[in-house]
């Protein structure tokens, strides 16, 4: 249900900056003391491509702090979803983590980003490699039917420090499969491969190690990555991106961009 429409100005102490929408928080869910999800109303005129990010902030100062957030919801959703880390003393997240239903979020008007289907040449299988909140752009893409028009199979990998941090991704995929419309499009073409690095779990280890050892392919029962058929998207910390990119290049994949589609693309997950 949509609570408010464009340019809501509720609970605001300062005027809305010119290039921003002021939207209303419709739900907040805390997963751990480091992670939470929230949803806001969607301005009727706001369009984006699944996988893109947008700058968001709070109306708590004359000059609000803005940070880039991947939009976690798909293009057809009537609300906008974000998945965020909470950083103690973080310029935005120290305040953002306290938001409640009815509060206002500022959102700039122009989305952008490289983790979009258009930045990849078509293939049979799309791997989405994520750590932590880096799963957010993929939460959008795996709920977009267009992703399944372009690829026969989607493998989403999500690696976190501990098991509690996997919950957002696990719920997301379970909800897709249970959804009457989306479930029919997606069927068994979407697979989630969750691993943890600092706790005991069925699947353990950094994605880079699992790619190097080939364990990921054994676990999934698929052939190793092949540049003829496989495509990749990466979203995580700077170090994770660097190392996962090197791993994909070893398999012969080539980094692309919006204006130069290739076999893999990368984007840094939001911090702070
Ligand atoms: P690790 O526990 O071994 O550091 P964070 O919460 O710090 O963003 O980390 C999320 C996940 O990303 C953790 O499981 C972490 O593993 C993993 N990770 C951190 N750095 C890298 C890297 N350079 N390559 C692959 N995975 C990484």
Image: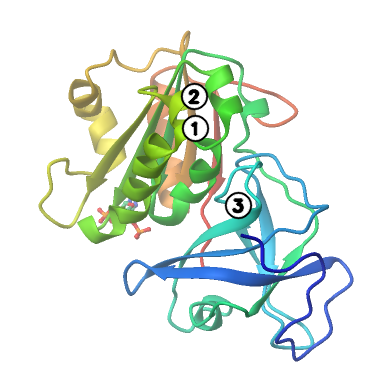
Task: Please identify, in this view, whether the residue under mark 1 or under mark 3 is nearer the observer.
Answer: 1
Give the crowd class for mark 1: few <14, some 14-19, many >=20 residues within 10 Å: some
Q: CA distance from mark 2 to mark 1?
A: 5 Å
Which x, y percent locates residue 98?
A: 50, 83
Q: Is residue 120 above or below residue 234?
A: above
| Residue for badge 1 | 182
Q: In the rendered image of this protein, does residue 24 appear above or below residue 59?
A: above
Where residue 197 appears, as percent x and y from the top left, is: 21, 51
Q: Tell whether label 3 touches label 1 (CB within 8 Å).
A: no
Q: Which mark is residue 71?
A: 3
Name the secondary structure under disc 3: loop
Q: Which of the pair 269/136 is nearer the observer?
A: 136
**Crowd around label 2: few <14 · some 14–19 · many ≥20 (10 Å):** some
Mark 2 = which residue?
185
Q: Which mark is residue 92?
A: none
Q: Residue at x 77, y 59 (%)?
A: 43
Looking at the image, residue 216 sits to the left or right of residue 228; the answer is left
Q: CA distance from mark 1 to mark 3?
A: 18 Å
Q: In the rendered image, is residue 107 in sight? A: yes
* Left or right of residue 44, residue 269 in this image: left
Answer whether residue 162 is visible to the viewer in this image: no
Q: CA distance from mark 3 to mark 2?
A: 21 Å
Whether the residues at callouts 2 and 1 have beta carbons within 8 Å, the answer is yes
At 69% across and 39% down in the image, what residue appears? 49
Q: Is residue 167 left or right of residue 156?
A: left
């Amino acid at each position: 249900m949509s609570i408010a429409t464009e340019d809501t100005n509720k609970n605001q102490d300062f005027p809305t900056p010119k290039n921003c929408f002021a939207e209303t928080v419709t739900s907040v869910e805390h997963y751990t003391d480091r992670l939470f999800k929230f949803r806001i109303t969607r301005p009727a005129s706001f369009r984006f491509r699944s996988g893109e990010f947008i700058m968001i902030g709070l109306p708590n100062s004359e000059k609000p702090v803005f940070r880039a957030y991947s939009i976690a919801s798909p293009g057809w959703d009537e609300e906008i979803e974000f998945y965020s880390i909470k950083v103690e003393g973080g310029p935005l997240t120290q305040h953002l983590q306290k938001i409640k239903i009815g509060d206002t979020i500022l959102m700039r008007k122009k989305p952008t980003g490289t983790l979009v289907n258009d930045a990849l040449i078509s293939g049979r299988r799309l791997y989405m490699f994520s750590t932590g909140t880096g799963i957010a752009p993929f939460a959008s893409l795996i709920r977009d039917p267009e992703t399944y028009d372009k690829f026969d199979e989607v493998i989403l990998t999500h690696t976190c420090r501990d098991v509690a941090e996997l919950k957002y991704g696990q719920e997301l995929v379970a909800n897709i499969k249970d959804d009457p419309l989306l479930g029919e499009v997606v069927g068994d073409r979407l697979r989630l491969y969750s691993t943890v690095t600092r706790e005991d779990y069925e699947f353990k280890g950094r994605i880079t190690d699992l790619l190097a050892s080939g364990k990921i392919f054994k676990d999934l029962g698929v052939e190793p990555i092949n540049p003829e058929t496989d495509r990749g998207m990466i979203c995580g910390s700077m170090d994770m991106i660097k190392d996962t990119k090197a791993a994909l290049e070893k398999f012969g994949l080539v980094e692309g961009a919006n204006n130069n589609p290739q076999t893999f693309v990368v984007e840094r997950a939001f911090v702070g």
